Amino acid sequence: MATLAKRLAEDNAPPSILIGTSAGALNVVGLGGYFDLGLSAAAGEVVHQWGSLKLDDVFEPVSSIVGSGLRYLGQLAGMPVRLPSLLDTERLRTTLLEQLPWGRLHENIREGTIDAVAVTATSVATRGTVVFVEKNCSVKLPPYDPRRNITYVETTLGVEHVLASSAVPGLFHPVQVKEPRRWSGWYVDGGLLLNTPVKPAVDFGTDLLGVVATHPRTWPTGFPSEQSRHTGKPDVFGAVALSMRAMLADRMIEDLRAIERRNEIARAYPKIARHIDFIFAGPSLDRAGEIAALADEVFREKFACLRGTQNPSLWALARLIGGEAADRGDLLSFLFFDPAFAQAAADLGRAVELEFSGRESGS
C-alpha cells in the first residue's frame, strides 16, 4: 500500500475515491482520515497503525475457543444457545473506535480533501454485496448492478461498517449494521463475493485504478504435477486455506481480465467503451507464497517453543492450525496480528517493489 501510494504521488495522480474490503476497509478509512497529510504520509500512518496492532487488540484466542467449545456442546445438548463464530472479536470494536481517525475522515470528505470512502460487506439476507459509501456532493452514487448483485448505499461510515466488511465467515462474528435504517441487518466479510473491489471503482467512473493485493493478478500456470506448492492431500485446514485463496484472489483476477478486455474494445471503438488504466501492486506469480512463508518463519523465530511465552495468545492460536506448511502459513497470515509480522511484511513489500506493471492499458 505504501509503495503504491508513493508511485501515485510520483505520477501526480492521487486517488479521489478509496474503496476497501476486509482488511482493506481498515486501510481506506485510515487513508481517508489522514488524507490531508498527503497520500504518502497517510499511507505511512496506516502502516504504523498496523505495526502497533496486537492479537489481544482483536480477540483472545484461548477464551474464544473455550467459549465456542462450550457453546457447541450446549447446542449439541439441546440448550437454547448458538455458535456464531469460532472467535469473539468484540475487542476489535474498541480498538477500531480508538485507533481509526473517524473525525478527520468525516471532515476530509465534507471539505472535499477526498471525494468518497467506501467499504464493502456481504448481506446475509440478500446474499449480495453492499458498498457503504460516505461521499461529498460532487460524487454520484452508482446504480444497482443486477449482474453482480452490488448495491451502493450512502451513509456516514462507522465502526460497524468496517467490522462487517472484515467479519470472516465462521471465524469472526457476523455484524449487525443499523445505519442506514433500510439497510440494517446482518453482514459478513465483503471478501466473500468481492475481496478486491475493482467493479465498484469502475462503476464510480474512474479512469485510473490503483489495486493493492496480497495475491498475484494471474492464476498458477502449468499442470498440477508441475506445481511446487499445495501438492499434498488437503486436510480440513488445507481446504479452508484453499477456500480463502479462492475467495481473496479469483474474483480480482476475473475483474482485471474484464478491464483488459474492455480496454481492447476501447482501443478499437473509443466511442463505445471507456479506457481504464490500472496500476497493480501485489506479488508476482513466482512470489505468490512469500507472505505465507514469512508468517510461518516469523512465528517459528519469535514464538515457537518456550519463546511462545512472549505472546501466549498467538502461540495458542498457532497450535490450533494444522495442515502442511504452506496452508498453515496462509491461515496464520490472516490472523497474525503482531508487530513482528507486520514489520516483516512491510519490509517484504518494500524489498520486492511489488509487481508494478506501470500505468497499464490492459494489454
Image (cartoon, grey):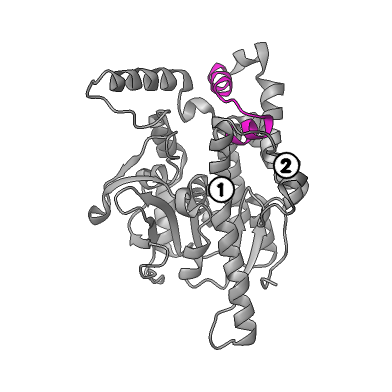
| Mark 2, other Cα within 10 Å: few <14 / some 14–19 / many ≥20 | some
Question: What is the magenta segment's predominant secondary structure?
Answer: helix
Q: Kindly identify which residue carries mark 1.
A: 246
Q: x%, y% of residue 217?
A: 65, 57
Give the labeled residue for mark 2: 348
Q: Quadrant of residue 335?
A: top right
Residue 88: name its quadrant: top left
Local crowd size for mark 1, using a 10 Å CA cut-off: few (<14), some (14–19), many (≥20) = few
Q: Quadrant of the C terminus?
A: bottom right
Q: Which residues are magenta?
A: 312-331
Check disc 2 and give the amino acid type. Answer: Leu
Which residue does the image show at 36% across and 39% down from the upper left? 174
Left or right placement of residue 324 versus residue 56 in this view: right
Q: Nearer the viewer, residue 268 or 275?
A: 268
State left or right for residue 153 relative to residue 228. Answer: left
In magenta segment, residue 327: yes
